[in-house]
Amino acid sequence: MRTLALPTAGNAGAAWAAYGARAGLEVVVVMPETTPSVIRREAAACGADVYLVPGSIADAGDVVRDGCDRYGWYDASTLKEPYRVEGKKTMGFELVEQLGWRLPDVIVYPTGGGVGLIGMWKGLDELRAVGWLPADAPLPRFVAAQSAGCAPVVRALAEGAERAAPWERPETFAAGIRVPRPLGDFLILRALRETSGTAVAVPDEAIAATMELAGATEGMVVCPEGAAALAAAATLRRGGWIGADQTVVVFNTGTGLLYEDSLPGRAPWRLEAGEAITVMVDGPQDGAAPRGPREGGRPGRG
């Protein structure tokens, strides 16, 4: 093979482009035109030929399949090749190792194509099979976190279906989980059911608020997909599905810096040359907030 091709709206395009560059392979990446610009540019920076198409990642997949049929490219789409799930399962290996060869009670994973969830489920089962974990050790309850604007797995699980019906008009700024119907939907659903797990849909407003919360309280600039997983965990904790004494691992699958237009936080304050910072006294406490216009004309607090 000299050329590989894949559809993506998230990390996979840049990852394949980087590995392709190292291996001397041409890489064709097809993305929905709504994919954040930094994600597009990252794949292009690694030498990939990037194409933008209207619609969703499903439409990008149609273009890739046509190209593979027409030109003999290698189809690197999710679960169309045997290697990505083998790589993803190492997340499960590292997780168990870092927890001192113990299994957590719950794993929450942002789910678009679902390969990460499938891979960890596979990897943890293999650790039991080779005796590195007790054969009777229950696997963690897996949670698929999705956006309320594109939640085919959540709907299929609730309906007791074996396969997910395509989600009509998928809409979410969390591009990596904007997948109308994952190819491995039956494996995702099987993993959730066999581990007594669940699937949670989170509104985009909650995803954005959780991105801001993670940054302001933990100094973590998480991607929208990771914020969806964190918000899903919070929802399950409030509802009692997750107990106060349980070990829960929430996966953040990328940096929020790839989502430049969606980054939270207050706009910077504008100071003129030589101007000092002026703070206001806010009740009995001072130093609460500066005065003056923010960058872009946004008014300040107070």
Image: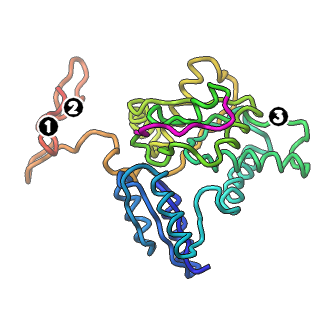
Range drawn in magenta: 161-171
Whole-angstrom CA distance, mark 1 to mark 3, is 58 Å
Q: Are there few (<14), some (14-19), or many (20+) residues within 10 Å of tag 2? A: some
What x and y, as percent, mark residue 275?
9, 47
Q: Which mark is residue 62?
A: none
Q: Is residue 153 left or right of residue 162?
A: left
Name the residue located 70 percent from the left edge and 27 percent from the top edge: 246
Q: Earlier in the sequence, mark 1 or mark 3?
A: 3
Whole-angstrom CA distance, mark 2 to mark 1, is 8 Å
Q: Amino acid at mark 2?
A: Ala
Q: Nearer the viewer, residue 51 or 85?
A: 51
**Front of the two marks 3 and 2:** 3
What x and y, as percent, mark residue 241?
65, 21
Name the residue located 65 percent from the left edge and 24 percent from the top edge: 242
Quadrant of the rendered image containing residue 298? top left
**Front of the two marks 1 and 3:** 3
Q: Which residue lies under the disc numbered 2?
A: 289
What x and y, as percent, mark residue 223?
45, 46
Q: Is residue 164 magenta?
A: yes
Q: Are there few (<14), some (14-19), or many (20+) residues within 10 Å of tag 1? A: few
Q: Which residue lies under the disc numbered 3?
A: 138
Q: Nearer the viewer, residue 114 or 125?
A: 114
Q: Which residue lies under the disc numbered 1?
A: 278
Whole-angstrom CA distance, mark 3 to mark 2, is 51 Å
Q: Is residue 209 left or right of residue 97?
A: left
Res. 217 visible in picture: no
Q: Is residue 123 magenta?
A: no
